[in-house]
Image: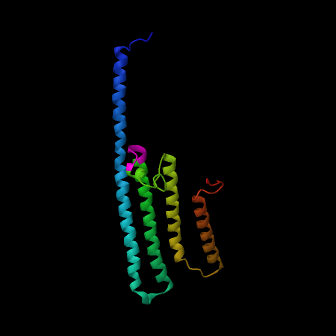
Amino acid sequence: MATEPSYGQTRRKRFELQFEKVLWKLRLIAILPVIMSLTSTGVTFVLGTLEIGKAILGLGTFADQDKAYVARVLGGVVSGIDLYLIGIAMLIFGYGVYELLISPIDAARNEEKAGEGLLDIRDLDQLKEKLVKVLVVALIVSAFKPMLSLPIVDSPSLAFFCLSVLLLAISGFLVTGDLGKSKKH
């Protein structure tokens, strides 16, 4: 025979349900990092565009075409690309937080190729993995920038340059996640 819940149990259950509703709605505070990361994406894209634009405008002084000039122009372009990559990382973060904590984005699911690409984030591990990949690529680009103006004047400086290139190549290989894994077909 099933017994009727007592008044205390019913009251406790109502309190638990109310508390869970409030708790569930508190997840919406995650909209703040979403908005800030999307704002940061826009800012870094604008800064990257300005950096590349400044480098392109520097082409007007074509008479100063020495190695330092070329390194400055390429450095500006690489800085812009680095800012774009950081913006992409912020976009992935904002998108992932929204998808994981607030709501799936229906517009993304309705597209033809939905569920594919960098913004397809189903769990926290995927978000972390995608962020790490983009950030490592941004660090590789950042490390590449000083290499543009690295003077190679003797054997040790050439060896240092070659070692730097090798380390960047290894980093690029490791970030793809292919080390020790077989690809799914």
In the rendered image, the quadrant that contains the C terminus is: bottom right
Q: Is residue 175 above or below residue 143?
A: above
Question: Residue 167, how many percent across, how many down?
Answer: 61, 66
Any magenta on residue 81?
no
On screen, residue 107 above or below 66: above
The part of the chain drawn in magenta is 99-106
Image quarter where the N terminus lies is top left
Q: Position of residue 170 (x, y in %)?
A: 62, 64
Q: Is residue 21 left or right of residue 89?
A: left
Residue 171 in percent (x, y) is at 59, 62
Residue plotted at (37% across, 18% down) = 9
Quarter of the image for residue 168 reads: bottom right
For image coordinates 41% across by 74% down, the residue present is 52
Q: Residue furthest top?
A: 1
Q: Position of residue 25 (x, y in %)?
A: 34, 38
In this view, the residue in front, 151 or 169, is: 169
